[in-house]
Image (cartoon, rainbow, N blue to C red):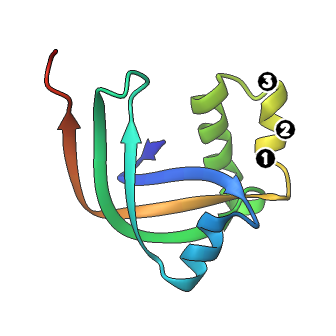
Amino acid sequence: MFHEGRLYISTGKKSRKVNNIRGDSHVAFAVEDSTRLKAIVGKGTAKILPSHGPQNEIMKKLVIHLVGSLEHPYAKLMMGENRVIIEIVPTAMKKWESPPT
């Protein structure tokens, strides 16, 4: 989810993404639409935020963006203590579109 110029991703506390960011906060990313015909690719600096506590409002917005409601069964899993938010501040982005077939 893009919000106020930043990209937010939910993932597990012990995921490979989290371990990689702890080692090096410089990241590359690609965000595709559901058809895989358009994407935003870029690079930036990432940090890990807890999914509860002060960042909870960000997680609520992310959950609603992804599953539509805080009442959705997956919402509680996403907001659990074993989840974190990755916040990426992009330093470069580029739009990509597949040519029509």
For image coordinates 61% across by 49% down, the residue present is: 58
| Relative height, residue 24 to residue 92 (above, below) | below
Instruction: Give me the disc on residue 79.
Output: 1
Q: Position of residue 88 (x, y in %)?
A: 45, 62
- Spatial CA span between label 3 and label 1: 11 Å
Question: Looking at this rendering, what residue extends furthest in the top direction?
Answer: 101
Instruction: Give me the disc on residue 76.
Output: 2
Q: Is residue 29 left or right of residue 71?
A: left
Q: In which quarter of the image is residue 12?
A: bottom right
Q: Which of marks 3 and 1 is nearer the N terminus?
A: 3
Q: Are marks 3 and 1 in contact (CB under 8 Å)?
A: no
| Relative height, residue 30 to residue 90 (above, below) | above
Q: Position of residue 4 (x, y in %)?
A: 39, 50
For image coordinates 41% across by 55% down, the residue present is: 6
Q: Position of residue 62 (x, y in %)?
A: 60, 40
The amino acid type, in three-letter code, at marker 1 is Met
